[in-house]
Image (cartoon, rainbow, N blue to C red):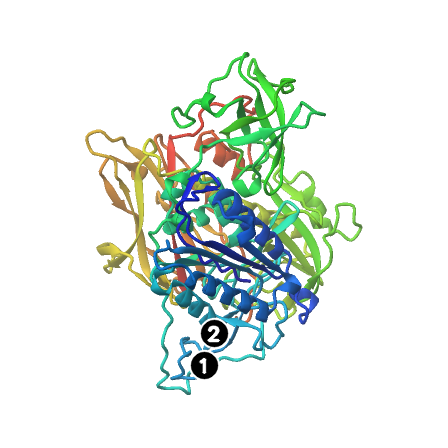
């Protein structure tokens, strides 16, 4: 699917209210296609209409677009011809503006399938793809083989050029789609239409192939959902489906208070962090090009908002209140809000990191349920450190809520169990009382723990509920898949027996259901997946930009070694072009590398820190880079201004099973000595394809959510520090290729 956003600067005087004295033309065309009349049932999508609704709400309520100027084409209305007609109307309206008009703001949002068709031949004006394939947007009337209905990327670039000509508009292209034809599926759908019989031009025969790469016009920015070799999944939020990119772009832009300071670069970085916070395993990598440093939607300070949400209530139940913000605004179940009658009563929530309450404090709200744009909350007051249910005052009409404690989630692993029917279809999820549910799953669900000291962390998801992983069963074997599928291409790994079903290719496993160790094997695998998943979520919570946290820098370093494996030269790893033509840190089999950690605090006024650096590979394995062995705290200690290299490491050393794909170095820095060495664990086996916690110490969070252990079952009943500044984290990612 693709979401295409073309946008310009905004002038408003107050939140959601345009300045009628100097307002630029603002138009939006939102296209969502999930029902394709010429495609098979398994090629239909589910979240595209929700995407257009979310985008419409964002543009109107957050950025002040006029409802009459937002045109939506969903499903059968979104034919190739109609989309082209509406794009032409946008160009005509922009170029009909008086010469002295402010640049127009145009949004074109497409949500549906993305695909590929053969590029034009060498020398043709449209020949712009070195790989011989054009990317396309797939309208509702497209055919499997790809005909004239498809909207080529050439047309998209032409539209951007036309509408920006003469600085008439500034443009943002947002592509929530993928064009890759590979990748293992999860329970959700991928937004790419595979056309196996459509082949690229034989670029090898065109020995002097001449292409003219397309370039965005000045003022345009392109944010795409993933690399060309990755797949963009749909994301389930409660019972609703969205495109992954759309879901989190709308959340970030709804949630951000100072949008006038949010650049496209910062938005792209925030997307990666939000994917981690949401526990999206194997998430694709958003790509950004163009005017990266410009402000998103050209927002000015007039669009910034105060960090509170409006509250109303149903007079029939004064114990409940409606918060006019939901999951698309970053509101989460379990979070706590303080309630005020008027905005001018609210103290600066950033003025103090500690929230104090007493028995006479004002009403508070606990979020009980969220949907996309609203949340239901119960009303309570604090009494002797406990939450006591109460009601709103009889004369209460409306109020304003400020978040004081953010609940990041329960860190549990939700698993669906399905039987693979064919490459495109699974059975409905098996229920806990289903007699066909394998015994190893029943054993795993018996508390989801190995003993009483381990907290429950595994639950079985029903068919219509969101989940994190899928246990897919085929014949006598099973494999575990991320619920969003594997976004990257599966590379050739160690050979597996031919008897393993191709329906399990790309998953972690396989698990032999007839084996006496099947239950133990499954539990080990699920525990490892959740450990890595939760570790990434915890890292995303650190807020490393806060000056009061430890200030430590992490770098990937290329090195030379001598015959004794001692480092004799080092240099920062160079950004190079990956297979998709994107700038990345690329590592090859056999590469020698290390990491550098630097305490960047001032030598005179700074403080020492203790650093652990972990390495996570594409198959969920965790190694420790620093310290070299458990208990080596002297290697972890880093004085202010001090820098240190880890020992040398070799990527996919000869004799080791090669693991390709994304790798991550995670640094955890604390003010006191730490021992996170026990997080290390081996990589999961993979069934390869043939080719193609809030406000607690880091120690407490890691123990409960990665070791799955609790300390006496205690639970905080009242808010304390809004943030824990005793630790920080940093992440460096790179790609390993053969």
Element class at badge 2: strand
Circles 2 and 1: CB atoms closer than 8 Å: yes
Q: What's the residue at 45%, 72% (across, down)? A: 154
Q: Is residue 225 above or below residue 137?
A: above
Q: What's the residue at 45%, 28% (across, down)? A: 722
Residue 598, how many percent across, how many down?
27, 42
Query: What is the quadrant of the C terminus in the image?
Result: bottom left
Residue 719, how many percent across, how many down?
50, 23
Residue 211, how many percent across, how many down?
37, 78
Q: Outermost residue toward the front? A: 98
Q: Earlier in the sequence, mark 2 or mark 1?
A: 1
Query: What is the quadrant of the N terminus in the image?
Result: bottom right
Q: Can residue 145 be seen from the camera position used here?
A: yes
Is 735 left, or right, of 182 in this rendering? left
Element class at badge 1: loop
Residue marked by disc 1:
120
Q: Quadrant of residue 628?
A: top left
Label 1 Cα crowd, 10 Å radius (few <14 / some 14-19 / many 20+): some
11 or 598: nearer the eye? 11
309 or 266: nearer the eye? 309
Whole-number angstrom distance, CA of label 2 to CA of label 1: 8 Å
Q: Which mark is residue 134?
A: 2
């Amino acid at each position: 699917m693709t979401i295409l956003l073309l946008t310009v600067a905004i002038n408003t005087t107050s939140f959601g209210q345009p300045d009628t004295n100097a307002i630029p033309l603002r138009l939006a065309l939102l296209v969502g296609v999930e029902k394709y009349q010429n495609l098979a049932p398994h090629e239909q999508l589910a979240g595209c209409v929700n995407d257009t609704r979310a985008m419409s709400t964002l543009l109107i309520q957050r950025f002040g677009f006029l409802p009459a100027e937002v045109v939506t084409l969903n499903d059968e209305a979104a034919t190739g011809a109609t989309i082209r007609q509406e794009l032409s109307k946008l160009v005509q309206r922009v170029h009909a503006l008086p010469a002295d008009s402010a640049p127009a703001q145009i949004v074109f949002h497409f949500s549906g399938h993305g695909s590929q068709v053969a590029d034009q031949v060498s020398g043709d004006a449209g020949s712009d793809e070195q790989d011989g394939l054009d990317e396309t947007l797939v309208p509702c009337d497209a055919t499997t083989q790809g005909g004239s209905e498809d909207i080529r990327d050439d047309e998209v670039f032409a539209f951007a050029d036309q509408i920006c000509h003469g600085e008439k508009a500034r443009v943002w292209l947002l592509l929530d789609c993928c064009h890759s034809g590979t990748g293992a599926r999860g329970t959700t759908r991928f937004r790419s239409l595979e056309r196996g019989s459509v082949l690229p031009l034989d670029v090898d025969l065109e020995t002097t192939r001449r292409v003219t790469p397309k370039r965005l016009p000045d003022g345009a920015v392109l944010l795409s959902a993933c690399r060309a070799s990755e797949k963009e999944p749909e994301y389930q939020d409660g019972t609703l489906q969205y495109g992954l990119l759309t879901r989190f772009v709308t959340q970030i832009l709804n949630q951000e208070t100072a949008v006038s300071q949010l650049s496209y670069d910062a938005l792209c970085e925030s997307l990666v962090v939000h994917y981690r916070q949401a526990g999206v395993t194997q998430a694709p990598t958003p790509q950004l090009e163009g005017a990266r440093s410009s402000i998103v939607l050209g927002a000015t300070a007039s669009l910034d908002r105060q960090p509170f949400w409006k509250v109303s209530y149903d007079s029939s139940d004064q114990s409940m209140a409606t918060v006019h913000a939901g999951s698309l605004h970053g509101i989460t179940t379990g979070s706590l809000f303080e309630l005020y009658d008027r905005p001018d009563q609210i103290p600066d929530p950033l003025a103090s990191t500690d929230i104090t309450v007493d028995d006479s404090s004002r009403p508070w709200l606990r979020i009980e349920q969220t949907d996309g744009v609203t949340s239901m909350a119960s009303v309570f007051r604090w009494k002797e450190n406990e939450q006591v249910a109460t009601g709103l005052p009889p004369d209460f009409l409306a109020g304003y809520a400020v978040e004081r404690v953010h609940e990041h989630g329960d860190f549990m692993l939700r698993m669906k169990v399905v039987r693979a029917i064919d490459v495109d279809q699974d059975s409905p999820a098996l229920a806990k009382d289903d007699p066909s549910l394998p015994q190893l799953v029943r054993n795993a669900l018996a508390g989801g723990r190995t003993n009483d000291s381990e907290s429950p962390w595994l639950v079985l998801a029903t068919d219509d509920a969101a989940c994190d992983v899928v246990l897919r069963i085929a014949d006598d074997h099973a494999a575990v898949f991320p619920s969003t599928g594997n976004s990257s291409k599966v590379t050739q790994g160690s050979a597996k027996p031919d008897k393993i079903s191709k329906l399990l290719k790309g998953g972690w496993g396989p698990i032999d259901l007839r084996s006496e160790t099947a239950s133990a094997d499954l539990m080990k695998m699920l525990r490892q997946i959740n450990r890595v998943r939760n570790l990434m979520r915890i890292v995303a919570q650190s807020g490393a930009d806060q000056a009061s946290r430890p200030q430590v820098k992490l770098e990937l370093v290329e090195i030379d070694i001598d015959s004794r494996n001692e480092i004799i030269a080092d240099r920062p790893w160079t950004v190079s072009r990956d297979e998709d033509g994107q700038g990345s840190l690329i590592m090859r089999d056999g590469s020698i590398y290390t990491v550098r950690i630097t305490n960047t605090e001032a030598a005179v006024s700074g403080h020492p820190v203790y650093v652990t650096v972990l390495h996570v590979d594409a198959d969920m394995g965790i190694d420790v880079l620093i310290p070299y062995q458990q208990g080596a705290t002297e290697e972890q200690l880093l004085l202010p201004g001090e820098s240190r290299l880890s020992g040398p490491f070799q990527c996919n050393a000869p004799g080791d099973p090669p693991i390709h794909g994304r790798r991550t170095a995670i640094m955890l820095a604390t003010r006191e000595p730490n021992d996170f060495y026990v997080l290390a664990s081996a990589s999961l086996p993979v069934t390869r394809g043939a080719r193609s916690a809030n406000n607690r110490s880091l120690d407490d969070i890691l123990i409960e959510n990665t070791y799955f252990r609790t300390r006496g079952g205690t639970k905080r009943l009242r808010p304390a520090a809004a943030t824990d500044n005793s630790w920080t984290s940093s992440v460096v990612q790179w790609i390993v290729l053969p």
